[in-house]
Image: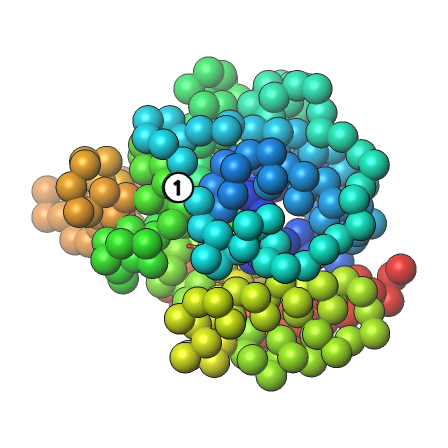
Amino acid sequence: MEKRKLIIDCDPGVDDALMLAFAAAHREEFDILAVTTVNGNQDIEKVTRNALDLTAFYGLKVPVAKGMGLPLVKEPHYAPETHGESGLGTCRLPASPEKAEEEPAVLFLYRILAGLPEEEKITIAATGPLTNIAVLLRLFPEVKRKIREILFMGGSLCGGNVTTAAEFNFYVDPEAAKIVFYSQIPLVMCGLDVTEKCTLTRNQILKLCQSGYPAARACGDMMGFALENTSEKYRGEVSVHDAAPLMYLLYPGIFSGQNEILDVDCSDGPSRGAVLGGFRWWRNEETEANVFVLTDVDREKFQEYLITALYALGEAE
Ligand code: BDR
Ligand code: CA
């Protein structure tokens, strides 16, 4: 099978950390050209340090480039209650001696895309606010034709997790999400509609914590923090939102979804960051749909594939 060329844009972040573990376990299927970071769950210095430490810890040899430290318009809004002060709960990873690229992420991404052979395209998986991608598309619109698709974790058609209306990544930078929505690049939205079903249970997390494999154990430790420190503890399971885009790339058959015409609310009111969608009689759903929205997943299969990947990573050490 030909490897899919992939760029990962993220803000680790506990669930970003599990997404990176899943990516590392599937390095035979993914040709990961770069990991870029963006302010989101924590500030840009912390999430970049986490990306460097995580990739080294998982044995994933890939350049890491530091991205935008601020959203396009508003001030940052971090999420220490879910991800801890460091961004990775209370998990302590060995410090990687690697450094981030000299170039800022947006320029680094531009160089990768501009340097591709004529017929080649790249997939982008974005699991933080879409700030880097928006700036890239605004600065260098000519790279759009080199992007095969963007899969992003963000948004929701079923209510938010920061406000009643808005999901975290879209709440932090709705203007960036809007630019991506209007980019005319094929988009797959892995929003809360589906990621609320992409969970690990308390028992599964406990088992990971007891694993003899360091990567699986660290992932259990991080997810345990997210479970016990949020209202997820009453549910007894916690979403691994950011693993959804990569899971969809490898196992599309366990998901279902539909095409939608979507927009984002960038007003200052209570619905800032909300995704606006649904039937619009004056538009042609067939030709104007701009986003494929994932709405459902086979939860057991998601859990099985994720857990298997986390253990496989340990065995590879
Ligand atoms: C998203 O918000 C972040 O806190 C998570 O890492 C995920 O990307 C879920 O709403
Ligand atoms: Ca994230």
Residue located 69% across and 34% down the image: 64
Q: Is residue 233 above or below residue 171?
A: below
- Mark 1, Cα crowd under 10 Å, few <14 / some 14-19 / many 20+, is some
In the picture, the quarter occupied by the C terminus is: bottom right
Q: Is residue 212 above or below residue 143?
A: below
Three-letter code, disc 1? His
Q: Nearer the viewer, residue 77 or 147?
A: 77
252 relative to 273 in the view: left or right = right
Residue indicated by mark 1 = 77
Q: Position of residue 298 (x, y in %)?
A: 49, 75
7 relative to 258 in the view: left or right = right
Residue 317 seen from this side: yes
268 relative to 294 in the view: left or right = left
Q: How is the image coloured?
A: rainbow
Residue located 56% across and 23% down the image: 106
Residue located 66% across and 44% down the image: 50
